[in-house]
Every structure is written in structure tokens, then in C-alpha cells.
Amino acid sequence: MSAYIQLCGSDDRESWLAARMNGIGASEIAAALGESPWKSPLTLWAEKRGLVAADDLSDVEAVRWGLVLEGVVGVEYARRSGRGYEPAGKLLRSVAHPWALATLDGWTVTTDGLRWPLEIKTTGAAHG
């Protein structure tokens, strides 16, 4: 049995956002634990219950560039590491912990064919 269930793809943003309301994803876990400088556990709870609207991050510069560069970074990772790269983008739910959600950035594929999750991040630049 698989350790996760695939819910939807991130290519349908509205369905992806709606499905994320039914669990806690990697970008929300710090808020759930009271460790986020941007969101409190109470605000996260209110968003998940539909009592307040979640912040729209679609026009945040770092978010936009992160999405645009994700595939480029994955391809470069493959070139430098000698491993394969497969884009992912599917929202997954843990079977063991149904509240736990994740949208993988990609998969890295070893030379013996094993697939491992690949998390891709980009950095920002400070302007003076």
C-alpha cells in the first residue's frame, strides 16, 4: 500500500487551493506549531475553518519567481548531480496521517532507478 494518496495537480490552482483546505501542508506547519513569524496558529485554524480568507500570495515576487524557476533549478540539479529529475506538482495526502499534505516540487531519480522527493528552493536578493 502506498504511503500517500494523490489528490490533485497544482496545474489546476483552484482545485489545488480547495484541496489544501482539508489538511496542513509543509508551508503551514510552522504556523500550526506557533513557530511562524507570518501567521499564528489561530489565524491558520480560522483559515482552515473558512472563517477568514487566506492571504493571496500569487502576486508576491518571491513566490512568483520560485514557481517560474522551479523547473530550471530541477534541470540544473539533474545536470550537476548526475541524477534524473521529474517534475511533480501533485498534492499528496499521507495515509498514516491524513491531515498531512504535501505538494512535491519534483522527484530525483538515482542511477539504480529509485525515486526520492526533491524539494526545490530559490533565494532572494536584497536591494540596497
Image: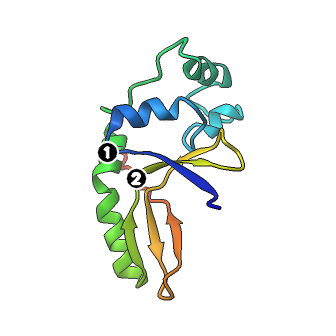
What x and y, as percent, mark residue 73?
A: 34, 65
Element at badge 2? loop
Q: Earlier in the sequence, mark 1 or mark 2?
A: 1
Give the residue displayed 41% in from the left and 37% down from the top.
16
Q: Is residue 128 visible?
A: no
Give the residue displayed 67% in from the left and 25% down from the top.
41
Up the image or down, 86 lies above or below 66; here it is below
Give the residue displayed 61% in from the left and 60% down from the top.
2
- Seen from the viewer's position, the closer of residues 46 and 121 is 46
What x and y, as percent, mark residue 53?
A: 47, 17
Pointer 2 residue? 89
Up the image or down, 114 lies above or below 99; here it is below
Looking at the picture, which amino acid does disc 1 mark? Asp
- Seen from the viewer's position, the closer of residues 71 and 97 is 97
1 and 2 marks in contact (CB < 8 Å): yes
Q: Is residue 14 visible?
A: yes
Looking at the picture, which amino acid does disc 2 mark? Gly
Up the image or down, 101 lies above or below 108; here it is above
Up the image or down, 82 lies above or below 38; here it is below
In this image, 28 relative to 87: left or right?
right
Pointer 1 residue? 11
Q: Within 10 Å of the Cα at label 1, are there few (<14), some (14-19), or many (20+) other Cα atoms? A: few
What x and y, as percent, mark residue 18?
A: 45, 29
